[in-house]
Image (tube, rainbow, N blue to C red):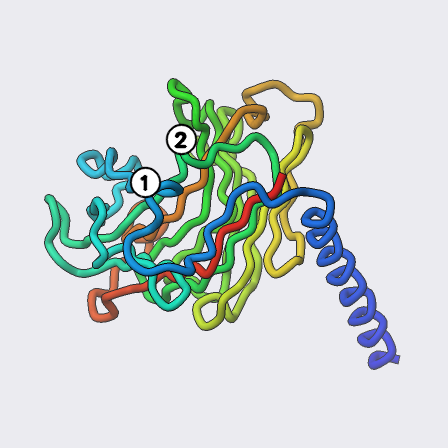
Amino acid sequence: MGIHLMLINFFIASIAVLSQSDETLEFKKQMELVWSDEFDYEGLPDSTKWSFDIQGNEWNWGNNELQWYTDSKVENAVVSDGTLKITARKEKTGNKEYSSARLRTLGKGDFKYGFFEVKAKLPKGNGTWPAIWMLPSAPGKDWPSGGEIDIMEHVGFKPDTVFATVHTKAHNHIIGTQVGEDFLLPEATTDFNVYALYWDEEQIKAYVNGVRYFKYEKNGQGPDVWPFDTEFHLLLNLAIGGGLGGKKGVDDRLFPHIYEIEYVRIYQ
């Protein structure tokens, strides 16, 4: 009887995974690809699509992070052999002991709603904090009232887990009310996986390899809960340490760390 029950549960779980996988396929069938980077070139990231974000270096990016994000250095961000490689190094840079890169599409890829898909392989080791996330593009949208969408975050001290989160004035980590979910992914640091987000007027949904594991809904609430009716841009970065990534310290023996992205695709 126990074996039969296990088989039934496995069958139900398999149907759920297939259904959710079909959901992401349907998004792409129903929408048009409006922006992408396949990283099929060599050198610095395409400057018509990406810029280097360095404005928060002096104040630690609000999270007490330990890296200095560099500007247009192939040692920290380079496209080669079909992938973008964001590399964090143990080297004194600026007033920090580590260098890395933070890329954004602001002014070159700003989107209101859509389906966002990124295929990536994550670094492993205490102190790493890679992310795929979104911030509002319009000036004057202060955090957290302007909103933040975290498509994927990962911390090196928990290598088998990724998570998706939203931050708003009502829901954010400063007051301990952020809303998000974890996803067990043992192959996060060994394989490329597809991280995706669907966002429309009423909901935000996050996926890993086609499996939906997080949903956030507007439910008729105001901008304190739902500030997501304006254009946002995409960010890719590899932080070191900080309030989340550094909870169990930084293992200096493991540098350099490479965060590798195979493609970014955006549909509307």
Which residue lies at the image location 11% right of the left edge and 45% below the top edge? 94
Image quadrant holding the C terminus, namely: top right
200 sits left or right of 164 in the view:
right
At which x and y percent is residue 208?
A: 59, 57
Which residue lies at the image location 56% right of the left edge and 44% below the top edge? 266
Toward the viewer: 183 or 3?
183
**Splitting the image into 4 quarters, where does residue 76 fall?**
bottom left
- Badge 1 marks a residue whose secondary structure is strand
252 sits left or right of 144 in the view:
left
At which x and y percent is residue 191?
A: 48, 71
* Three-letter residue code for mark 2: Gly
215 sits left or right of 135 in the view:
right
Toward the viewer: 42 or 158?
42
Neighbourhood count class around disc 1 (C-alpha, 10 Å): few under 14, some 14–19, many 20 upward: some
The residue where tag 1 is placed is: 51
Neighbourhood count class around disc 2 (C-alpha, 10 Å): few under 14, some 14–19, many 20 upward: some
User: Do callouts 1 and 2 mark residues in contact (Cβ within 8 Å)?
Assistant: yes
Toward the viewer: 157 or 124?
124
The residue where tag 2 is placed is: 107
In the displayed structure, would residue 241 be above or below residue 198? below
In the displayed structure, would residue 120 be above or below residue 199? below
Image quadrant holding the N terminus, namely: bottom right
- Badge 2 marks a residue whose secondary structure is loop
Which residue lies at the image location 37% right of the left edge and 59% below the top edge? 41
Q: Counting residues from the N terminus, which is met first, the one under dot 1 or under dot 2?
A: 1
* Three-letter residue code for mark 1: Ser
At which x and y percent is residue 18?
A: 76, 62
Q: CA distance from mark 1 to mark 2?
A: 9 Å
Which residue lies at the image location 52% right of the left edge and 31% below the top edge? 171
**Splitting the image into 4 quarters, where does residue 22 fall?**
bottom right
